[in-house]
Amino acid sequence: MLRGPATELRSRLRRIAGALLAQRGTSGSWRTAAVALSELFSEIAPLAPNEAVSPDHEATVLAGGKAISTVDAARCISDTERTRAFLTGIAHTVRSGGREPVHVLYAGTGPYAPLVVPLTTIFEPERLRVTLVDVHPTSIERLDAVVRALALEPYVEAVHCADAACFDPPRSPPVDVLVVETMQRALTREPQVAILRHLLRRLPDTVVLVPRVVTITASLVTPGATTSDGARALGEVLAMDAAWARSAISELVPAATLQLDEPARPDQVLTLDTRITVADGIEIPEGASGLTLPHHLSEVPVDRAPATLSFAYRVASDPGLVCSVTEPWGVG
């Protein structure tokens, strides 16, 4: 039985988790809970202030994308829709797991592992175990402090400081759930795809991926427009699920080919929209989170038609979707 400071901290964490997971909550109550979660973690393991020169503020450019800094990773907690949807989806996935305990491999934890730590207040260690991975020593240092302060040792199989895109996942106990949220809008900049394709090829086919699917669609829109009037949907570009990630073995992975039958208006650009299915029935829709804001491909010419838009996903230090345009008879 917990005694001392850990008891009070876990009580606070339990109240916060309850508020974030409450289906009948409001946007205001969820936002308040996300702020409270950030404040709790900051009390346990403070980060360097903005004006300080510190490794906490340093990002790392990896072969598969940019690993955002420890401070920026902590700020992601305030993206309420993202935090709430992932917590809800992971809780749903753990409840649906057949084996006990359910072993979660969480890659890209940042300093606080906010997408699983609150769940230790609703699941016992006999139901939930976690392996935690992050590339930044500054994040691992804070994560160790969180584990100790909240007495999470019974839940934690191991904590690793490693690039998850090169990490050899544990074989015992076998991993049941893989959680990776290292992404930006339209899967740009960060190493989500590099991490997934590496880990999923080394994990059992039965592993459940969170998020289940990241769907990217293309449209022609007017940047900055307050309504969707005049926007034209072109179709689905990519649906990244576990099967797609396992098959993405090349550095330039072919995606969809879409037809442009009419040219865009002068004020329109090719735009990628993102929708995230975290778990069955749990989604982050377009524009609801920093992860699903529109991404404009202003450099792609869409002012002439008919034309063919050929998309591919580039896995590199600056990852993302690229598009080439082909007009009839090779013009363009």
Image (tube, helix red, strand yellow):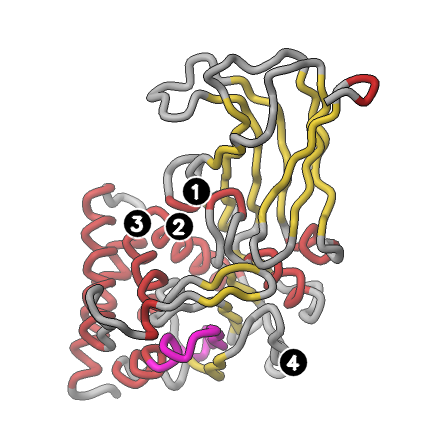
Disc 2 designates what residue?
85
Quadrant location of residue 219?
top right
Mark-to-mark CA distance, 2 and 4? 28 Å
Disc 1 designates what residue?
284
* Numbered range of the magenta stretch: 125-141
**Which residue is rendered at x = 22% and y = 74% of the image?**
46
Point out the tag, 2 or 4, that comes first from the N-terminus. Answer: 2
Q: Secondary structure at mark 2?
A: helix
**Which residue is rendered at x = 52% and y = 30% of the image?**
298
Observer able to see residue 122: no
The quadrant of the rendering that contains the C terminus is top right
Q: Is residue 178 magenta?
A: no
Quadrant location of residue 49?
bottom left
Disc 4 designates what residue?
171
Mark 1 in CB contact with mark 3 (< 8 angstroms):
no
Point out the tag, 2 or 3, that comes first from the N-terminus. Answer: 3
Measured as percent of width and height from the top left, residue 65 is found at: 55, 59
Kind of residue sitting beneath label 3: Thr
Q: Secondary structure at mark 3?
A: helix
